[in-house]
Image (cartoon, rainbow, N blue to C red):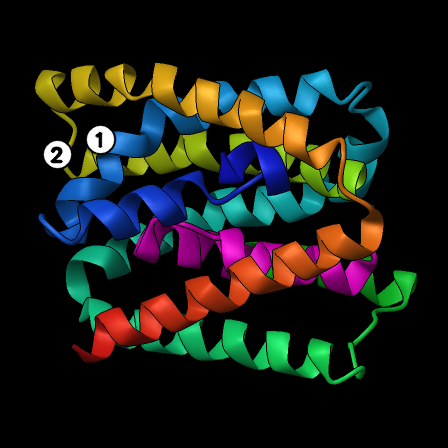
Amino acid sequence: MVKGLIGMGLPLVSITLMSIAIEPKVAIPFVLVSGIVLNVVQAIQMGSVRTVARRFTLLAIGAAVGVWAGTELLFAVNQRIIEVVLGLIVCCYVIINKTRLPPSLPRIWEQRLNLPMGFLFGVLQGATGSLAAPLAAWWQMLGLKKDEFVQASGYVLFIVVVPWAASLVAKGVISWRVAAISAGMLLPAAVGMYLGSRVRARVSEDRYRNVILGLLFVAGASLLVKAIL
């Protein structure tokens, strides 16, 4: 449902919940099929992707490259370090935003930063299984409206998930059993996405912004708690 509401968050929520019982390295591959299929649907159902593609393809390419480096970190670096850094970044962003001092980015700097920021997001995707929180913060800085937010998320996340899946295959963590379980998660994920999209259609821009900030803070705090405990 979170996926339908804000356009992202399926891996973050799913991996966090599954990690209660299994290691994140084991949980991460289970969200691949849902991530690929639902992100395509999400990008297309919002209308023409031409404008989004012109604006964010460079960001997506950077993320597609960075995800390979992130997957290497997943298997080489203590997961708690990455989770603490990501959690702190997200929580600090929410606090700044709610104190009425939200950072805004001029369009010219957006174009200059698209590639390096995309690479950073890709590293976080590969290392933690989700770039939802930092990407949502980035969309907020760019001032995207809720429909733009959702379509841009679907477009970028689809381009990132495909090489992410390839990097996990290269690491030998994708078996036929894992692929079958991942495919089995598609139906409940699709139902939740549909319900979330219905809710989104009835929410005002201000309330939508507050929902995103609330979910970001919960996600960031969850990462910190998970890393510390």
Instruction: Give residue 223's position: percent from left, percent from top.
Output: 33, 68
Q: Residue at x 22, y 67 (%)?
A: 79
Residue 140 is covered by the magenta coloring: yes
| Element carrying mark 1 | helix
Q: Is residue 151 left or right of residue 91?
A: right
Q: Are marks 2 and 1 in contact (CB under 8 Å)?
A: yes
Label drawn at residue 169:
1
Question: Where 190 falls versus 66 (above or below)?
Answer: above
State the extent of the magenta-drawn residues as a range: 119-144
Q: Residue at x 53, y 58 (%)?
A: 215
Pick the residue in front: 218 or 39.
218
Label drawn at residue 93:
none
Q: Is residue 225 left or right of residue 57?
A: left
Question: Where 124 falls versus 195 (above or below)?
Answer: below
Q: Is residue 37 left or right of residue 81?
A: right
Residue 89 is covered by the magenta coloring: no
Instruction: Give residue 124's position: percent from left, percent from top.
Output: 42, 58
Q: Residue at x 49, y 34 (%)?
A: 1
Q: What is the C-alpha distance between the residues marked 2 and 1?
A: 5 Å
Is residue 112 shown to the viewer in this render?
Answer: no
Q: Residue at x 13, y 43 (%)?
A: 26
- The quarter of the rendered structure image containing the C terminus is bottom left
Is residue 172 shown to the viewer in this render?
Answer: yes
Secondary structure mainly formed by the magenta segment: helix
Say which amino acid is labelled 2. Gly
What residue would you read off at disc 2?
A: 172
Say which amino acid is labelled 1. Val
Pick the residue in front: 71 or 22.
22
